[in-house]
Amino acid sequence: MTNAGSTPSTVRDGAPLLAFGLGLLCLLAMVPVTLGALAGYLTLGAAVPVLAVGAGVAVVSLVTA
């Protein structure tokens, strides 16, 4: 929401959309890692840190949005 006398800010208006897109991208990127771990292509030791980082970034960016 902008004031009547101010110019619109593209960065300020687009930041929530960018944060939401990043969160959604992280959630979607977790799917192949999970499927690879379930299929046996990845070990749990390799999949858990990747999933933890992906979940952390997704939560932070979605809360920011």
Image (cartoon, grey):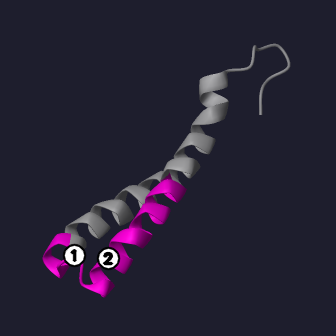
Q: Earlier in the sequence, mark 1 or mark 2?
A: 2
Contact, CB < 8 Å: mark 1 with mark 2? Answer: yes
Seen in the picture, residue 49 relative to 65 is either above or below; the reply is: below
- Would you name the residue on which mark 1 appears? 42
User: On the rendered image, what quadrant is the N terminus found in?
Assistant: top right
Q: Along the horizontal axis of the image, is 19 left or right of 46?
A: right
Can the viewer see residue 65? no
**At which x and y percent is residue 30?**
40, 67
Residue found at x 34% / y 70%: 33
Which mark is drawn over residue 14?
A: none
Splitting the image into 4 quarters, where does residue 16 fall? Answer: top right
- Would you name the residue on which mark 2 appears? 36
**Residue type pointed to by label 2:** Gly
- Determine the secondary structure under disc 1: loop
**Residue type pointed to by label 1:** Leu
Residue found at x 82% / y 13%: 5
Q: Please name whichever residue, 22 or 44, is drawn nearer the observer in this view of the structure.
A: 44
Q: Along the horizontal axis of the image, is 63 left or right of 38?
A: right
Seen in the picture, residue 55 relative to 41 is either above or below; the reply is: above
Seen in the picture, residue 41 relative to 61 is either above or below; the reply is: below
Q: Which residues are magenta?
A: 23-46
Q: CA distance from mark 1 to mark 2?
A: 6 Å
44 part of magenta stretch: yes
Seen in the picture, residue 38 relative to 46 is either above or below; the reply is: below
Question: Magenta segment, principal secondary structure?
Answer: helix
**At which x and y percent is residue 40?**
24, 84
**At which x and y percent is residue 55?**
37, 65
Can the viewer see residue 24? yes
